[in-house]
Amino acid sequence: MTKAQQYIIISIIVFFGVFFWLSKLQLQSELPNAIGDPLELVVVRDSDAHTNRFYQTIKNLLNTDLGPSPQPESILSIIEIENNKFTGILQRHHNILIITKSDNFNIKFENDVFAKNQTVIIISCNSEHELISNEEKIRQLHEEIKTVEINRLITSIEKKNNNNLKNKILENHNVSMLVPNGFFLAHLEKGLTWIRRETNKLSQGVFLANIPPEMEQLFFTQTSIAIDSMIRPHILGPISGSYMITDKNAPVKKDTISINGIEMIKQQSLWRMKNDFMGGIYVSYIFHGSSQVEPFIIYTYLYSPGEPKKTPLIQLDAIVRTLSFKSYN
C-alpha cells in the first residue's frame, strides 16, 4: 500500500469519526428539555410481556416511605403508562423506568435519551420471582433517583445563588455553602447563621451553628436536647411565648453520610412549636470537627401544612450538599 493510499484511508476514517461526533452533538442539541416534578417517575408498562401483578410488585418495591413526617408520604410519585401510549410529551419526563423482557436480570442507566437532563432506567427482567430475588437492587433505585434529583437542584443553585449569603457563611463558619436565590438572612451572630425562605405555602430554614467545646458531648449524645438549646431563643412562633423545639415523642431516623468528603451524622425527625399547634420535619447534620474546622451543626426545617414534603425537603438537602471546606471566589 502506497503512502498516498494510507493517507486516503486515514482521511476517510477521520472524516467519518468527525461526522459521527458532529451528528451526535446535533442530535443532543435537538433534544427538548426534560419536564416533570422532582421525584416523579414514569413507569412504561408492556402488558404483553408482564402481568399487572408484576408491575404492582415493582411499585411496592419502589414506594419507600419518606421517613419521620407528619403524614405518611412516599419518596417517589409513580405514573404508569402503556408502551403504546408512551409518546410525545410523556417521553420528556425527567425520570423514566422501562422494563424489558430478558433471561438475565440487569439494571442500566441512560442519560438524555428522549430529552435533555433526563434519566432513563432500563430493567431487564424475566419474571416477578426474579424481581423479588433482586429486591434490594430495586429498592435502592429510589435513593439513586433521589441523588439524581439533588444533583439537578445543585446545578440550578450553582447557576443562581445568593453570593452575599454565601460569603457571610464563609466568614462566620469557615465553610462554603451555596444558597439559592429566594432565601434571606434571618439572623446573624458570631458562630451562628440562620437563613430562611418564605412563601404562601411553606417555610424553609437552614441554621448553621458552630458547636462550643462545652456543648460537644451534648450534641453527640443527646442531639435533640442540644438542638433545642440552639433554636429555642431564635425561632419563635406567631403566638407570644411560642418557640420551636424538637418533638421528643417522634420517631428518629439516624444515619452517617459523607458530603464532599465531610463525614457527618444525619438525623431526621419532627419539630413542634411550644405553646402553639405548628409542626413539621427537621433534618440535622453534625460535623465532629477537624484541625481546620471546629465542630458545627446544620439544622434544616420545613413547615408545609397540608402540602407534600418530599420536594421542599430535597431542596434543603441540595443546599447542604453544596457544603465544602473550599473557598469559592
Image: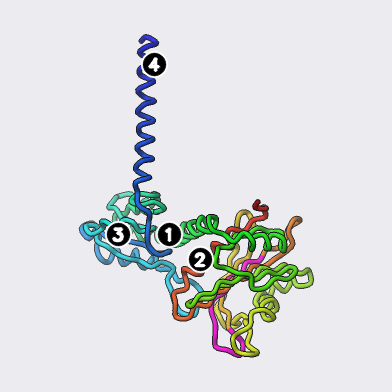
* Residue at far top of view: 2
Residue wearing tag 4: 7
Residue wearing tag 2: 314
Q: Where is residue 293 in the image (x, y as percent from the top left)?
A: 73, 59
For marks 4 and 1, the one nearer the N-term is: 4
Which secondary structure dominates the residues rendered in magenta?
Answer: strand
Number of numbered callouts drawn: 4
Residue 37 picture quarter:
bottom left
Question: How many angstroms separate mark 1 from mark 2 (CA)?
Answer: 16 Å
Classify residue 126 as left or right of residue 219: left
Q: Amino acid type of disc 4?
A: Tyr
Classify residue 146 as left or right of residue 88: right
Q: Which residue is drawn at 23% across and 59% down?
A: 85
Residue wearing tag 1: 141
Q: Which segment did they paint magenta?
A: 273-286
Q: Residue at x 44, y 80 (%)?
A: 306
Q: Which residue is drawn at 76% across and 69% down?
A: 212
Q: Position of residue 277 (x, y in %)?
A: 54, 88
Q: Are marks 1 and 2 in contact (CB under 8 Å)?
A: no
Residue wearing tag 3: 90
Residue 27 picture quarter:
top left
Q: Which residue is drawn at 54% across and 58% down?
A: 160
Q: Amino acid type of disc 1?
A: Leu
